[in-house]
Amino acid sequence: MRQVSVFGNPDLPADAMPVSLLPELRKRFPDIEFIHQDPNEDCTPPESPWIIIDTVKGIPGVRLITDADLIQVKKRLTLHDYDLGMHLTLLKKIYPKLQLRIIGIPLGSSREEVLPEVVRLLSAALREELS
């Protein structure tokens, strides 16, 4: 079964959006195993491309961030969790063929704003794997 990692802290309202989307995402994508993970704990890629849903500070709307974008994102934007950015950079060195697909949700956004775009981007990332 395909896995998608979901980061976010349900105890911090600005960072809780990815976790709050889980019930609806599980309903819409029954063949996907959504795993709520703490990026500061044992967080290794389950497969490549590794699809992650997380809150990102400094973006105006939901967007797909790829491993090619990671360097640009670090220069222009700040990943909400700096440790995640560092962790992903290190994983890219350990697993050079690892591809990343991060569905970034703007910090403090509303469910109504982001759910349709998260669903669209996740569907596109999953279709990309099949082609």
Image (tube, rainbow, N blue to C red):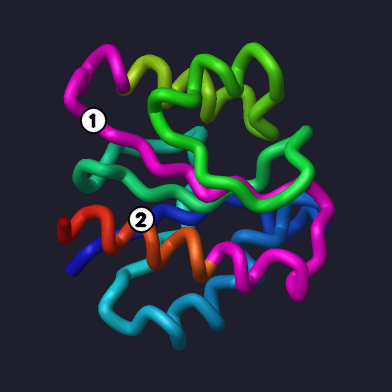
Q: Return the disc, 1 or 2, that comes first in the chain's sequence.
A: 1
Would you say 78 lies left or right of 13 here? left
Mark seen at residue 116: none
Q: Position of residue 50 (x, y in %)?
A: 31, 44
Instruction: Specify few, some or many for label 2: CA neighbours under 10 Å numbering under 14, 14-19, or 20 or more.
Output: some
Magenta stretch contains residue 105: yes
At label 1, which amino acid type do we have? Leu
Label 1: which secondary element: loop
**Residue 51, relative to residue 113: is it above or below?**
above
User: Of helix, strand and loop, which one carries label 2?
Assistant: helix
Residue 78 vertical position relative to residue 118 in the rendered view, above or below: above
Left or right placement of residue 53 versus residue 17 in this view:
left
Q: Give above or below for 128 relative to 79.
A: below
Residue 18 appears in which quarter of the rendering? bottom right
Give the image quarter of residue 44: top left
Residue tagged by mark 2? Answer: 125
Q: Quadrant of the N terminus?
A: bottom left
Q: Residue at position x 36%, y 37% from top?
A: 100
Look at the picture and state if 23 lies above or below 49. Answer: below
Residue carrying label 1:
98
Identify residue type, mark 2. Answer: Ala
* Residue situated in front as seen by the camera: 38 or 52: 52
- Depth check: give the residue in front, 110 or 38: 110
The range drawn in magenta is 92-118
Residue at figure coordinates x 26%, y 43% from the top left = 49
Q: Position of residue 61 (x, y in %)?
A: 73, 50
- Give the spatial CA distance, label 1 vs label 2: 15 Å
State the residue at coordinates (16%, 56%): 131
Nearest to the eye among marks 1 and 2: give it: 2
